[in-house]
């Protein structure tokens, strides 16, 4: 008996010692939450999703410790609306974060005058109300500044309707333009337009460190998307529909005596070239084609412009690991609040970048090196959770914001092949998913997905029913015991279904801009509209706006595929064979679109409108260049 007591005492002391030495807290209480979101990662770019030539041991380990979501979807196949849906649990068409303008399918400039409306309720806001410490690292792409004035009286209340509606919002911003031209682009007395009101710190995050817009090729000083000559040709091509009729009208006005030959010459050889010069300057200076649009923020402060890409993943990883360590280090005093970390990678969107010592490691070139460096970062974050002793009380999600960027060819990802064990057709082994980023074919909207929360959910199993990134918010709400927002959610809780492998959704709908172009019902995929490809390809390398027009082909009756037999969407089923499927989906679609009419936000998202020069972030006017201090 004495021996047993001594052994028990030693065990207790050993546990206490481990807690004191490692700063480990018990796993009781609400879980910590970590979301790992990758940019443009293909479904087939990970070992745990069938890739045998790319090494991703850390993400593969996460999949073994959790559930692999083989049929996880994003509702829209481009970054801005997809990220909006993940954070709010709602289709982006409800929040205004989409566009039907061909060139503005995603936020195309850091100087756009809007962002995610403050009336929307994010995962971070929900968790903050539950006492969580919330931290975001990486890409945001949901807006920076507003085009209306913010005074010291309105800083604490960033509801868009509460802002001073100053003259920047009217007269095409002429007054703001004049202030900008005279060297005062951001303020008028106590009134500032560089207000950062749409940054993450105003959407529920306590702290933010990252790029508020996307990484593009122009962020790489050694790479140019368009040469000046090509850009001028592009402007002429795009402006031809306006310039040609103007010149024709001027010519005939001269012929019939309404305009003098001198005036015709002045307009043709002075005004039109000046307009082209202004257009060239504007596009190359205030859109994502400008290298100064590659910016790095800490909270509300611009700390680096243009951003130095080479070390960015290392800096982001250090920030994320530091947040976990600082949050869980001390074993004394009151129990720290649970935390939410949103690690939103800039990778693997082009421009591609790695630390010098990570170059040349993959047989897939630069893209493979980038995937491997991202996998290293995931491993560092998981190691930090393990060292802090909070792995078993941390709910982790891993996914991508859309499919691979096929237009970048070797610098883009791989669509992959269906990983569903229920796929039994002859094409299941060989057929890759069709299409990519910007398209609602499977390759554009089906993304790799992992969810882990040991020991609360199963380990090493597959969930094969269709689910959405919009399910993350309601799933997290259930896990932490938070009430759902009063507004309509398009996502559903996954927790109970993960254990039983029961379906979550009846019908899932997918969008291109504001148009519902496709749906998923059980193992059936329905297409109402598909992308217009270039001949012989499933993408558009010569597209005017870098992606295929997703409104290319209308299908009536809709195309229907059985993804169990045909995951590559190669052979549409005859309409008479799927009449019941079409009738069911059509009825659900009618109800869904009717509901959207009453819940579509009129607020212009960053995908709508033109960049305002006075809203362009600038850390040191007029050079607009600075480097982050160590």
Image (cartoon, rainbow, N blue to C red):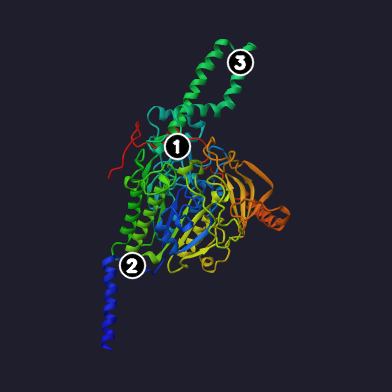
Which of labels 2 and 1 is toward the front? Answer: 1
Q: What's the CA distance linking mark 2 and mark 1?
A: 45 Å
Instruction: State the residue in front, 156 or 249.
Output: 249
Residue 37 lies, in percent from the top left, at 44, 52
Q: Do the residues labelled 2 and 1 touch (CB within 8 Å)?
A: no
Q: Residue at x 45, y 37 (%)?
A: 288
Relative to 194, does residue 269 appear above or below in the rendering?
above
Q: Can residue 130 be seen in this view?
A: no
Q: Is mark 1 on a helix, strand or loop?
A: loop
How would you rate the neighbour count of disc 2 (Cα within 10 Å): few for under 14, some for 14-19, many for 20 or more?
A: some
Q: What's the CA distance linking mark 3 and mark 2?
A: 80 Å
Q: Do the residues labelled 3 and 2 touch (CB within 8 Å)?
A: no
Q: Is residue 621 visible?
A: yes
Q: In which quarter of the image is the C terminus?
A: top left
Residue hosting label 3: 251
How would you rate the neighbour count of disc 3 (Cα within 10 Å): few for under 14, some for 14-19, many for 20 or more?
A: some
Q: What element carries label 2?
A: loop
Instruction: State the residue in front, 361 or 620.
Output: 361
Relative to 194, does residue 34 appear above or below in the rendering?
below
Instruction: State the residue in front, 175 or 305.
Output: 305
Q: Residue at x 37, y 59 (%)?
A: 382
Residue hosting label 2: 25
Q: Earlier in the sequence, mark 3 or mark 2?
A: 2
Residue hosting label 1: 288
Residue 541 lies, in percent from the top left, at 52, 38
Relative to 449, does residue 228 appear above or below in the rendering?
above
Q: Which of marks 1 and 3 is nearer the N terminus?
A: 3
């Amino acid at each position: 008996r004495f021996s047993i007591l001594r052994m028990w005492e030693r065990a207790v002391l050993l546990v206490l010692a481990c807690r004191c030495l490692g700063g480990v807290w018990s796993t009781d209480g609400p879980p910590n939450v970590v979301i790992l979101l990758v940019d443009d990662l293909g479904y087939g770019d990970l070992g745990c999703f069938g890739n045998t030539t790319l090494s991703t041991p850390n993400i593969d380990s996460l999949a073994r410790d959790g559930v692999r979501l083989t049929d996880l979807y994003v509702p829209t196949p481009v970054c801005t609306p997809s990220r909006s849906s993940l954070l709010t649990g709602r289709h982006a068409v409800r929040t205004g974060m989409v566009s039907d303008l061909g060139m503005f399918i995603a936020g195309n400039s850091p100087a756009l005058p809007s962002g995610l409306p403050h009336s929307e309720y994010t995962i971070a806001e929900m968790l903050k109300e539950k006492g969580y410490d919330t931290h975001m690292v990486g890409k945001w792409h949901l807006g920076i500044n507003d085009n209306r004035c913010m005074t010291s009286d309105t800083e604490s209340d960033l509801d868009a309707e509460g802002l001073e509606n100053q003259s920047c919002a009217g007269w095409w911003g002429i007054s703001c333009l004049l202030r900008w031209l005279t060297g005062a682009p951001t303020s008028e007395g106590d009134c500032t337009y560089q207000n950062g009101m749409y940054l993450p710190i105003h959407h529920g995050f306590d702290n933010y460190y990252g790029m508020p817009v996307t990484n593009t090729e122009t962020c790489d000083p050694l790479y140019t998307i368009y040469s000046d000559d090509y850009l001028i040709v592009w402007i002429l091509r795009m402006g031809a529909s306006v310039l040609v009729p103007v010149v024709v009208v001027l010519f005939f006005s001269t012929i019939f005596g309404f305009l003098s030959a001198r005036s015709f010459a002045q307009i043709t050889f002075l005004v039109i070239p000046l307009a082209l010069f202004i257009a060239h300057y504007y596009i190359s200076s205030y859109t994502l084609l400008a290298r100064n649009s590659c910016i790095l923020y800490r909270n509300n402060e611009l700390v680096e412009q243009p951003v130095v890409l080479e070390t960015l993943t290392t800096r982001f990883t250090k920030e994320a690991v530091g947040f976990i360590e600082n949050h869980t280090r001390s074993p004394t005093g009151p129990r720290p609040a649970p935390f939410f970390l949103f690690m939103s990678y800039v990778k693997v969107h082009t421009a591609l970048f790695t630390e010098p010592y990570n170059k040349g490691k993959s047989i897939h070139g630069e893209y493979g090196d980038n995937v491997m460096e991202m996998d290293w970062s995931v491993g560092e974050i998981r190691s930090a959770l393990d060292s802090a002793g909070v792995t078993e009380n941390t709910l982790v999600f891993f996914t991508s914001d859309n499919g691979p960027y096929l237009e970048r060819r070797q610098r883009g990802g791989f669509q992959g092949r269906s990983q569903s064990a229920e796929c039994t057709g002859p094409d299941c082994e060989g057929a890759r998913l069709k299409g990519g980023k910007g398209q609602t074919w499977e390759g554009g909207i089906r993304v790799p997905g992992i969810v882990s929360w040991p020991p609360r959910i199963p380990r090493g199993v597959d969930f094969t029913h269709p689910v959405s990134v919009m399910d993350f918010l309601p799933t997290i709400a259930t896990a932490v015991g938070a009430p759902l927002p009063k507004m309509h959610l398009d996502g559903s809780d996954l927790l109970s279904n993960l254990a039983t492998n029961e379906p979550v959704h009846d019908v899932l709908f997918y969008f291109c801009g504001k148009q519902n172009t496709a749906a998923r019902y059980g193992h059936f995929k329905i297409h109402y509209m598909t992308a217009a490809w270039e001949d012989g390809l499933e993408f558009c390398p010569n597209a005017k706006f870098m992606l295929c027009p997703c409104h290319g082909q209308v299908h009536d009756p809709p195309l229907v595929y059985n993804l169990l037999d045909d995951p590559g969407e190669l052979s549409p089923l005859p309409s008479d064979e799927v009449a019941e499927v079409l009738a069911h989906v059509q009825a659900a679609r009618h109800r869904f679109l009717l509901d959207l009419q009453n819940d579509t936000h009129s607020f212009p998202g960053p995908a709508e409108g033109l960049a305002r020069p006075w809203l362009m972030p600038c850390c040191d006017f007029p050079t607009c260049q600075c480097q982050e201090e160590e």
